[in-house]
Image (tube, rainbow, N blue to C red):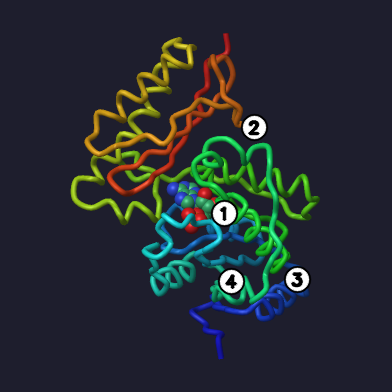
Amino acid sequence: MSDETRGKLRRTTTVGELRLAVAAARSEGKSVGLVPTMGALHQGHLSLVEASVAQCGFTVVTIFVNPAQFGPDEDLARYPCTLEADLDALARCGADVAFVPAAEEIYPAGHATGVELGGVAEPLEGQHRAGHFAGVATVVLKLFNMAGADVAYFGRKDYQQMQVVKQMVADLNVPITICECPTVREPDGLAMSSRNKYLAGDARQRALVLWKSLCLARRAVAQGQRDGETILRQMREVIRSAEGAVIDYAALVDPETLAGVARVEQPTLAVLAVKIDETRLIDNCLLEPPLE
Ligand code: AMP
Protein backbone atom coordinates (compact mmCIF):
# COMPACT_ATOMS: atom_id res chain seq x y z
CA MET A 1 0.00 0.00 0.00
CA SER A 2 1.68 3.18 -1.14
CA ASP A 3 -0.93 5.54 0.25
CA GLU A 4 -0.26 7.22 3.54
CA THR A 5 -2.45 9.74 5.29
CA ARG A 6 -1.24 12.58 7.53
CA GLY A 7 -4.25 14.57 8.74
CA LYS A 8 -6.05 15.44 5.55
CA LEU A 9 -2.86 15.04 3.47
CA ARG A 10 -2.65 11.89 1.39
CA ARG A 11 0.65 10.71 -0.06
CA THR A 12 0.43 8.99 -3.42
CA THR A 13 3.18 7.45 -5.48
CA THR A 14 1.44 6.37 -8.69
CA VAL A 15 -0.23 8.33 -11.45
CA GLY A 16 -3.30 6.10 -11.12
CA GLU A 17 -3.79 7.02 -7.45
CA LEU A 18 -3.21 10.68 -8.19
CA ARG A 19 -5.84 10.66 -10.93
CA LEU A 20 -8.38 8.91 -8.69
CA ALA A 21 -7.84 11.45 -5.91
CA VAL A 22 -8.23 14.37 -8.32
CA ALA A 23 -11.33 12.80 -9.94
CA ALA A 24 -12.94 12.42 -6.50
CA ALA A 25 -12.27 16.10 -5.72
CA ARG A 26 -13.67 17.12 -9.10
CA SER A 27 -16.82 15.07 -8.52
CA GLU A 28 -17.35 17.25 -5.43
CA GLY A 29 -17.10 20.32 -7.64
CA LYS A 30 -13.65 21.38 -6.38
CA SER A 31 -11.11 23.27 -8.46
CA VAL A 32 -7.61 21.78 -8.47
CA GLY A 33 -4.29 23.57 -7.81
CA LEU A 34 -0.88 22.05 -8.53
CA VAL A 35 2.47 22.98 -6.97
CA PRO A 36 5.43 21.20 -8.61
CA THR A 37 8.53 20.99 -6.38
CA MET A 38 11.70 19.02 -5.89
CA GLY A 39 11.16 18.80 -2.13
CA ALA A 40 13.46 20.04 0.67
CA LEU A 41 10.58 22.42 1.22
CA HIS A 42 11.02 25.88 2.72
CA GLN A 43 8.72 28.84 3.17
CA GLY A 44 9.20 29.80 -0.51
CA HIS A 45 7.60 26.53 -1.60
CA LEU A 46 5.01 26.71 1.16
CA SER A 47 3.92 30.19 0.04
CA LEU A 48 2.92 28.58 -3.29
CA VAL A 49 1.03 25.85 -1.44
CA GLU A 50 -0.70 28.46 0.73
CA ALA A 51 -1.75 30.37 -2.41
CA SER A 52 -3.20 27.20 -3.92
CA VAL A 53 -5.02 26.24 -0.72
CA ALA A 54 -6.49 29.76 -0.54
CA GLN A 55 -7.60 29.78 -4.17
CA CYS A 56 -8.44 26.14 -5.04
CA GLY A 57 -10.69 23.56 -3.43
CA PHE A 58 -8.05 20.83 -3.77
CA THR A 59 -4.26 21.17 -3.74
CA VAL A 60 -1.77 18.68 -5.15
CA VAL A 61 1.94 19.16 -4.36
CA THR A 62 4.44 17.08 -6.28
CA ILE A 63 7.83 16.18 -4.84
CA PHE A 64 10.12 14.79 -7.51
CA VAL A 65 13.82 15.43 -7.99
CA ASN A 66 13.79 15.32 -11.77
CA PRO A 67 17.02 13.74 -13.05
CA ALA A 68 16.35 15.04 -16.57
CA GLN A 69 16.95 18.65 -15.54
CA PHE A 70 20.39 18.10 -13.99
CA GLY A 71 23.57 18.19 -16.03
CA PRO A 72 26.24 15.49 -15.55
CA ASP A 73 28.37 17.80 -13.37
CA GLU A 74 25.49 19.12 -11.29
CA ASP A 75 24.21 18.26 -7.82
CA LEU A 76 21.59 15.54 -8.50
CA ALA A 77 23.32 12.97 -6.29
CA ARG A 78 23.51 15.29 -3.27
CA TYR A 79 20.26 17.24 -3.77
CA PRO A 80 18.76 17.63 -0.28
CA CYS A 81 15.91 15.31 0.71
CA THR A 82 13.78 16.03 3.80
CA LEU A 83 10.67 14.03 2.94
CA GLU A 84 9.22 13.47 6.42
CA ALA A 85 9.52 17.15 7.33
CA ASP A 86 8.12 18.08 3.90
CA LEU A 87 5.01 15.95 4.43
CA ASP A 88 4.48 17.44 7.90
CA ALA A 89 4.76 20.96 6.47
CA LEU A 90 2.35 20.17 3.63
CA ALA A 91 -0.18 18.74 6.10
CA ARG A 92 0.09 21.90 8.19
CA CYS A 93 -0.49 24.08 5.11
CA GLY A 94 -3.68 22.21 4.24
CA ALA A 95 -2.49 20.48 1.04
CA ASP A 96 -4.62 17.51 0.01
CA VAL A 97 -2.22 15.28 -1.92
CA ALA A 98 1.55 14.89 -1.92
CA PHE A 99 2.50 13.09 -5.12
CA VAL A 100 5.92 11.53 -4.49
CA PRO A 101 6.65 9.27 -7.45
CA ALA A 102 9.69 7.09 -8.03
CA ALA A 103 11.75 7.94 -11.12
CA GLU A 104 10.36 4.87 -12.96
CA GLU A 105 6.82 6.16 -12.51
CA ILE A 106 7.72 9.34 -14.37
CA TYR A 107 10.20 7.83 -16.82
CA PRO A 108 9.25 4.19 -17.46
CA ALA A 109 11.73 2.17 -19.50
CA GLY A 110 11.66 3.32 -23.10
CA HIS A 111 10.58 6.91 -22.33
CA ALA A 112 11.76 8.84 -25.39
CA THR A 113 9.60 11.95 -25.85
CA GLY A 114 10.37 15.46 -24.72
CA VAL A 115 9.46 19.10 -25.16
CA GLU A 116 11.62 21.15 -27.52
CA LEU A 117 11.99 24.79 -26.55
CA GLY A 118 13.07 28.07 -28.09
CA GLY A 119 12.45 31.73 -27.30
CA VAL A 120 12.65 32.57 -23.60
CA ALA A 121 14.46 29.27 -22.88
CA GLU A 122 17.49 30.29 -24.92
CA PRO A 123 19.38 33.04 -23.01
CA LEU A 124 20.76 33.04 -19.43
CA GLU A 125 20.18 29.58 -17.88
CA GLY A 126 19.70 28.25 -21.41
CA GLN A 127 23.30 29.24 -22.22
CA HIS A 128 24.76 27.92 -18.97
CA ARG A 129 22.80 24.72 -18.32
CA ALA A 130 22.44 22.81 -21.59
CA GLY A 131 19.29 20.70 -21.65
CA HIS A 132 18.08 22.00 -18.28
CA PHE A 133 14.88 23.66 -19.49
CA ALA A 134 14.01 20.80 -21.85
CA GLY A 135 14.13 18.54 -18.77
CA VAL A 136 12.06 21.00 -16.73
CA ALA A 137 9.44 21.57 -19.44
CA THR A 138 9.04 17.86 -20.16
CA VAL A 139 8.48 16.93 -16.52
CA VAL A 140 6.21 19.92 -15.92
CA LEU A 141 4.05 19.03 -18.93
CA LYS A 142 3.89 15.42 -17.71
CA LEU A 143 2.86 16.58 -14.22
CA PHE A 144 0.21 18.86 -15.75
CA ASN A 145 -1.16 15.90 -17.71
CA MET A 146 -1.02 13.58 -14.69
CA ALA A 147 -2.77 15.95 -12.29
CA GLY A 148 -5.18 17.65 -14.70
CA ALA A 149 -5.13 20.76 -12.51
CA ASP A 150 -6.84 24.07 -13.24
CA VAL A 151 -4.05 26.26 -11.87
CA ALA A 152 -0.31 25.64 -11.37
CA TYR A 153 1.78 27.79 -9.03
CA PHE A 154 5.33 28.90 -9.84
CA GLY A 155 7.74 31.20 -7.99
CA ARG A 156 9.36 34.29 -9.48
CA LYS A 157 12.54 33.15 -7.73
CA ASP A 158 13.04 30.92 -10.80
CA TYR A 159 11.86 33.65 -13.12
CA GLN A 160 13.11 32.23 -16.42
CA GLN A 161 11.68 28.80 -15.58
CA MET A 162 8.30 30.45 -14.97
CA GLN A 163 8.50 32.23 -18.35
CA VAL A 164 9.49 28.97 -20.06
CA VAL A 165 6.47 27.22 -18.54
CA LYS A 166 4.17 30.10 -19.55
CA GLN A 167 5.52 29.97 -23.11
CA MET A 168 5.06 26.19 -23.28
CA VAL A 169 1.48 26.46 -22.00
CA ALA A 170 0.67 29.13 -24.58
CA ASP A 171 2.47 27.46 -27.50
CA LEU A 172 1.09 23.96 -26.84
CA ASN A 173 -2.41 25.09 -25.77
CA VAL A 174 -2.12 23.38 -22.40
CA PRO A 175 -5.42 23.92 -20.54
CA ILE A 176 -4.01 25.30 -17.28
CA THR A 177 -3.57 28.75 -15.73
CA ILE A 178 -0.13 29.69 -14.43
CA CYS A 179 -0.13 31.68 -11.19
CA GLU A 180 3.06 33.67 -10.46
CA CYS A 181 4.11 33.97 -6.83
CA PRO A 182 6.60 36.45 -5.32
CA THR A 183 10.07 35.43 -4.13
CA VAL A 184 10.22 34.66 -0.41
CA ARG A 185 13.43 35.82 1.28
CA GLU A 186 15.21 35.27 4.55
CA PRO A 187 15.05 38.31 6.86
CA ASP A 188 18.48 39.43 5.59
CA GLY A 189 17.37 39.23 1.93
CA LEU A 190 18.82 35.90 0.80
CA ALA A 191 16.26 34.27 -1.51
CA MET A 192 15.07 31.01 0.05
CA SER A 193 16.35 28.00 -1.88
CA SER A 194 16.79 24.32 -1.17
CA ARG A 195 20.42 24.81 -2.23
CA ASN A 196 21.03 27.28 0.63
CA LYS A 197 21.56 24.13 2.72
CA TYR A 198 24.89 23.70 0.90
CA LEU A 199 26.17 27.06 2.19
CA ALA A 200 28.56 25.98 4.92
CA GLY A 201 30.24 28.26 7.45
CA ASP A 202 30.61 31.85 6.28
CA ALA A 203 29.40 31.01 2.75
CA ARG A 204 25.86 31.80 3.96
CA GLN A 205 27.01 35.35 4.80
CA ARG A 206 28.98 35.75 1.55
CA ALA A 207 25.90 34.63 -0.42
CA LEU A 208 24.24 37.90 0.58
CA VAL A 209 26.15 39.63 -2.23
CA LEU A 210 23.44 38.52 -4.68
CA TRP A 211 20.74 40.43 -2.83
CA LYS A 212 23.10 43.35 -2.11
CA SER A 213 23.88 43.75 -5.80
CA LEU A 214 20.18 43.59 -6.73
CA CYS A 215 19.42 46.24 -4.08
CA LEU A 216 22.23 48.39 -5.45
CA ALA A 217 20.74 48.12 -8.95
CA ARG A 218 17.35 49.17 -7.60
CA ARG A 219 18.88 52.15 -5.79
CA ALA A 220 20.83 53.19 -8.89
CA VAL A 221 17.67 53.14 -11.00
CA ALA A 222 15.69 55.01 -8.33
CA GLN A 223 18.44 57.68 -8.36
CA GLY A 224 18.15 58.13 -12.12
CA GLN A 225 20.81 55.80 -13.52
CA ARG A 226 19.56 54.34 -16.81
CA ASP A 227 22.73 52.99 -18.42
CA GLY A 228 22.70 49.21 -18.28
CA GLU A 229 26.47 48.71 -18.46
CA THR A 230 27.06 51.14 -15.59
CA ILE A 231 24.51 49.34 -13.42
CA LEU A 232 25.93 45.92 -14.30
CA ARG A 233 29.49 47.06 -13.59
CA GLN A 234 28.46 48.18 -10.10
CA MET A 235 26.54 44.94 -9.51
CA ARG A 236 29.53 42.83 -10.56
CA GLU A 237 31.82 44.82 -8.24
CA VAL A 238 29.57 44.07 -5.27
CA ILE A 239 29.44 40.37 -6.10
CA ARG A 240 33.19 40.07 -6.64
CA SER A 241 33.80 41.70 -3.26
CA ALA A 242 32.83 38.34 -1.71
CA GLU A 243 35.57 35.73 -1.55
CA GLY A 244 34.76 32.64 -3.63
CA ALA A 245 32.00 34.35 -5.63
CA VAL A 246 32.10 33.58 -9.35
CA ILE A 247 29.54 35.13 -11.69
CA ASP A 248 27.90 32.84 -14.27
CA TYR A 249 25.90 35.79 -15.54
CA ALA A 250 24.61 39.17 -14.39
CA ALA A 251 22.19 40.68 -16.87
CA LEU A 252 19.42 43.23 -17.38
CA VAL A 253 16.60 41.82 -19.49
CA ASP A 254 13.10 42.51 -20.70
CA PRO A 255 10.77 40.79 -18.17
CA GLU A 256 8.63 39.23 -20.92
CA THR A 257 11.10 38.24 -23.66
CA LEU A 258 14.26 38.01 -21.51
CA ALA A 259 16.15 39.81 -24.29
CA GLY A 260 19.05 41.98 -23.07
CA VAL A 261 18.30 45.63 -22.30
CA ALA A 262 20.87 48.41 -22.79
CA ARG A 263 18.95 51.18 -21.01
CA VAL A 264 16.55 50.87 -18.10
CA GLU A 265 13.72 53.06 -19.38
CA GLN A 266 10.97 50.46 -18.76
CA PRO A 267 10.49 47.86 -16.01
CA THR A 268 13.56 45.64 -16.41
CA LEU A 269 14.56 42.41 -14.73
CA ALA A 270 17.99 42.19 -13.12
CA VAL A 271 19.00 38.50 -13.13
CA LEU A 272 21.94 36.76 -11.51
CA ALA A 273 23.54 33.35 -11.40
CA VAL A 274 26.52 33.24 -9.05
CA LYS A 275 28.57 30.44 -7.59
CA ILE A 276 29.52 30.84 -3.96
CA ASP A 277 32.28 28.27 -3.62
CA GLU A 278 30.60 25.18 -5.13
CA THR A 279 27.00 26.35 -4.66
CA ARG A 280 25.27 27.90 -7.67
CA LEU A 281 22.59 30.41 -6.66
CA ILE A 282 20.16 32.38 -8.83
CA ASP A 283 18.16 35.47 -7.96
CA ASN A 284 16.42 38.35 -9.69
CA CYS A 285 14.47 41.51 -9.05
CA LEU A 286 12.43 43.95 -11.07
CA LEU A 287 13.93 47.41 -11.63
CA GLU A 288 11.18 49.97 -12.07
CA PRO A 289 12.24 53.42 -13.24
CA PRO A 290 9.77 55.98 -11.85
CA LEU A 291 7.41 57.31 -14.54
CA GLU A 292 8.65 60.71 -15.77
P1 AMP B 1 12.12 23.75 -6.71
O1 AMP B 1 11.77 22.79 -5.62
O2 AMP B 1 13.39 24.48 -6.50
O3 AMP B 1 11.99 23.12 -8.08
O4 AMP B 1 11.00 24.89 -6.68
C1 AMP B 1 9.63 24.56 -6.79
C2 AMP B 1 8.83 25.84 -6.94
O5 AMP B 1 9.03 26.67 -5.80
C3 AMP B 1 9.25 26.68 -8.16
O6 AMP B 1 8.09 27.24 -8.77
C4 AMP B 1 10.10 27.75 -7.54
O7 AMP B 1 10.14 28.95 -8.28
C5 AMP B 1 9.39 27.96 -6.22
N1 AMP B 1 10.30 28.59 -5.26
C6 AMP B 1 11.52 28.13 -4.86
N2 AMP B 1 12.09 29.01 -4.01
C7 AMP B 1 11.22 30.04 -3.87
C8 AMP B 1 11.23 31.26 -3.13
N3 AMP B 1 12.25 31.61 -2.35
N4 AMP B 1 10.15 32.09 -3.22
C9 AMP B 1 9.10 31.75 -4.02
N5 AMP B 1 9.02 30.61 -4.74
C10 AMP B 1 10.07 29.77 -4.67
How busy is the neighbourhood of tag 1: few (under 14 within 10 Å), some, or many (20 plus)?
Answer: some
Give the foreground label among 1 and 2.
2
Disc 3 on helix, strand or loop? helix
Give the foreground label among 2 and 3.
2
Q: Earlier in the sequence, mark 4 or mark 2?
A: 4
Where does residue 245 sit, x and y in percent of width and height? Answer: 29, 37
Quadrant of image for the N terminus: bottom right
Q: CA distance from mark 1 to mark 2?
A: 23 Å
Q: Amino acid at mark 1?
A: Ala
Q: CA distance from mark 1 to mark 3?
A: 19 Å
- Check the image and name the residue furthest to the bottom: 1
Q: Residue at the location (60% across, 57% down)? A: 52
Residue to which mark 4 is pinned: 96
Residue to which mark 2 is pinned: 256
How busy is the neighbourhood of tag 4: few (under 14 within 10 Å), some, or many (20 plus)?
Answer: many
Residue to which mark 3 is pinned: 26
How busy is the neighbourhood of tag 2: few (under 14 within 10 Å), some, or many (20 plus)?
Answer: few
Q: Earlier in the sequence, mark 1 or mark 4?
A: 1
Q: Amino acid at mark 3?
A: Arg
Q: Is residue 107 above or below residue 173?
A: below
Judging depth in this view, the residue of 115 and 141 nearest the camera is 115
Disc 1 on helix, strand or loop? helix
How busy is the neighbourhood of tag 3: few (under 14 within 10 Å), some, or many (20 plus)?
Answer: some
Q: Amino acid at mark 2?
A: Glu
Q: Residue at the location (22% across, 36% down)? A: 243
- Quick check: can you spot residue 248? yes
Residue to which mark 1 is pinned: 51
Q: Residue at the location (57% across, 51% down)? A: 131
